[in-house]
Amino acid sequence: MLRFAVDAMGGDNAPACVVEGVIQALKESDNRFEIVLIGREDAVRPLLENHDTSKLNLTFLHAPEVITMHDVPATAVKTKQNSSLVVGLGLCKQGKADAFVSAGNTGAQMAASLFVLGRLPGVQRPTIAAYFPRISDGLTNVVDVGANVDCKPEHLVQFAEMLTVYQRDAAGIEKPLTGLLNIGEEENKGPELLKQTYKLLQEADRKGKITFIGNIEGNDILQEKASIVVCDGLVGNTLLKFGESLPGFLTSIFKPTIQQLAASGELSPQAAETASQAFRRMFQPFDVEKFGGVPFLGVDGISIVGHGRSSERAIKNMIYMAEHMIEKKVNQHIAEALAQA
Amino acid sequence: MLRFAVDAMGGDNAPACVVEGVIQALKESDNRFEIVLIGREDAVRPLLENHDTSKLNLTFLHAPEVITMHDVPATAVKTKQNSSLVVGLGLCKQGKADAFVSAGNTGAQMAASLFVLGRLPGVQRPTIAAYFPRISDGLTNVVDVGANVDCKPEHLVQFAEMLTVYQRDAAGIEKPLTGLLNIGEEENKGPELLKQTYKLLQEADRKGKITFIGNIEGNDILQEKASIVVCDGLVGNTLLKFGESLPGFLTSIFKPTIQQLAASGELSPQAAETASQAFRRMFQPFDVEKFGGVPFLGVDGISIVGHGRSSERAIKNMIYMAEHMIEKKVNQHIAEALAQA
């Protein structure tokens, strides 16, 4: 039976939301797996006592230290060895857990995952991809979104290779399409980094490791030209954060407009509510909680990284994601893909 | 009297829309300036004949060649010396025009502007900034948005300095705030380029050339943390194009939803129309046609670059922008700012 280590202390709504998510996952899955919930006893125990957990495959492990969102990643990992984050990844390393799930400090989780789990053979730099809004089926993953800056061409190519395996295995996309995010479509466009990367991506395509569709531009992302959008972490991180700020920005314009129309009688209260619902529905493609989180790809283990704002639903889906990645042998396939010359 | 050279052949809706825009500008301004409209006689003359231009300060200049959107910039500029673009910039160089305005091939306009007009003293790389959506007064300019990739720290600092002058002179912003677009707020975050740039921006701030507020992230742009957002052209171009694709993307979700609600009777036809109007109004901050275009900052002359989709309103506003930049002596002030040690 698979066993997941879950960080009870990670995320803006932790530990309450993590406890709820974990219990939901176990109930919903009929105890299909085991969960070790890790955190501070004084914070987590009282929450667990609100539930009847006697029939759940749930154990609790006390970890006295907590890495907060404000901790400096590298320092925190070194100085807080008894944190839920480091302890949880340690369980994976020792074979006492099959995956680790957290919605805590992303930088610290990446640093600790790399330090504790190490890299898969052949992987130069593990990476994090984000899910971008999409209307039709499939995925749009932008990679990297901040785990790596100052990338070299070979790093970007490995990101494409790892994501190709991930999308094939985890999402069943037969032929993931890789686009290189650039300022123009032509091969000779853009910075030196991307010109060189272009050639290497062509080579990877010829070897059958990826399907490369060439350069794509910022406006091609939401048009779903590629399922894998490759860029340096600076570009991806900026795009991701810009995109995340959009629903709030647009709502801050739309909401008062609708309220005004309702106040002036131009819209009935009911019509205003219906319009607002339609407006909110528009952001459904922006809902990435259905995925829960994203795997830190390329480390020798499964480490799922959640958004700080993760809800219990996100936590639950992160656990399913971990399970799915193990069943589909994503890591084994990544190592095989990168081992090929 | 100021004299503007306007490219009749530039833009998706050229020459019709350029002719309209030019005539509107002259009528609206009571012939406050002169315009030389440049383009192919066979394409432009018939359009002019639809109007009574006898009382307008409008002259037409035939240029037999046309640089299209599909032409490779550097090649086009070399091989099409008799194009409206090269001829128009030539007039500026010869002192026969005070500014050049085009909504044509941006790459070609940049190349030709640089080649024909040259750089202002002290400017290493001329740049193009874009206007980003903003709710409150003021401007948000992201710079660079594609004119320069592989930027060095000193280039990014000059972009900030030039934009500071531009926003002060052209928009009357007393103290433009410069933010460096990065993956985190801390000084030591991000790629090497930005770590070095951070220090140089601090220095420029100490010298009073700019007001530097530190690193900002993608989600800070629409929150208007800075009026000048500095980044390499790869990042800025990607963000700009991503942002431009949003209204279309969101409309493609919202419109059918509203239509469905109207069809099912959940919204009356009138309420559906009102809601759609509120929706469209939400994109008003995305309307950059009020600015018309953007100046190619740092060249020794005024070259205003418009969007390919420019309407007559945009063309008209680009002419006003050129006039305003001359009156406010933006170029002189840029040269003075960059000459200071």
Image: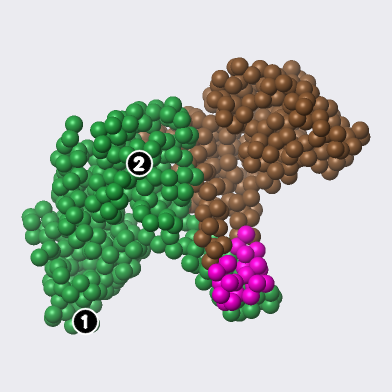
Chain colours: A green, B brown
> Which structural element holds mark 2?
strand
Mark 1 packing: few (<14 Cα in 10 Å), some, or many (20+)? few
Tell which of A248 and B266 is nearer to you: B266
Q: Provide the major secondary structure of the magenta segment.
A: helix
Q: Is residue A168 magenta?
A: no
- Label 1 to label 2: alpha-carbon separation: 46 Å
Q: Report whether B140 appears left or right of A308.
A: right
Q: Would you place residue B209 above or below residue A120 in this image?
A: above
Which residue sits at x=62%, y=70%?
A: B272
Q: In the rendered image, which quarter is residue A328 located in?
A: bottom left
Q: Is residue B99 visible?
A: no
Q: Quadrant of the N terminus of chain B?
A: top right
Mark 2 packing: few (<14 Cα in 10 Å), some, or many (20+)? many
**Residue that numbered label 1 is attached to:** A51
> Which structural element holds mark 1?
loop
Which residue sits at x=81%, y=42%?
A: B24
**Residue that numbered label 2 is attached to:** A178
Q: Would you place residue B196 above or below residue A138 in this image?
A: above
Tell which of B327 and A32 is nearer to you: A32
Q: Is residue B262 magenta?
A: yes
Which residue sits at x=13%, y=64%?
A: A3
Which residue sits at x=42%, y=36%?
A: A215
Q: Position of residue A220 (x, y in %)?
A: 47, 44
Residues in magenta? B258-280
Q: Position of residue A48 (x, y in %)?
A: 20, 77
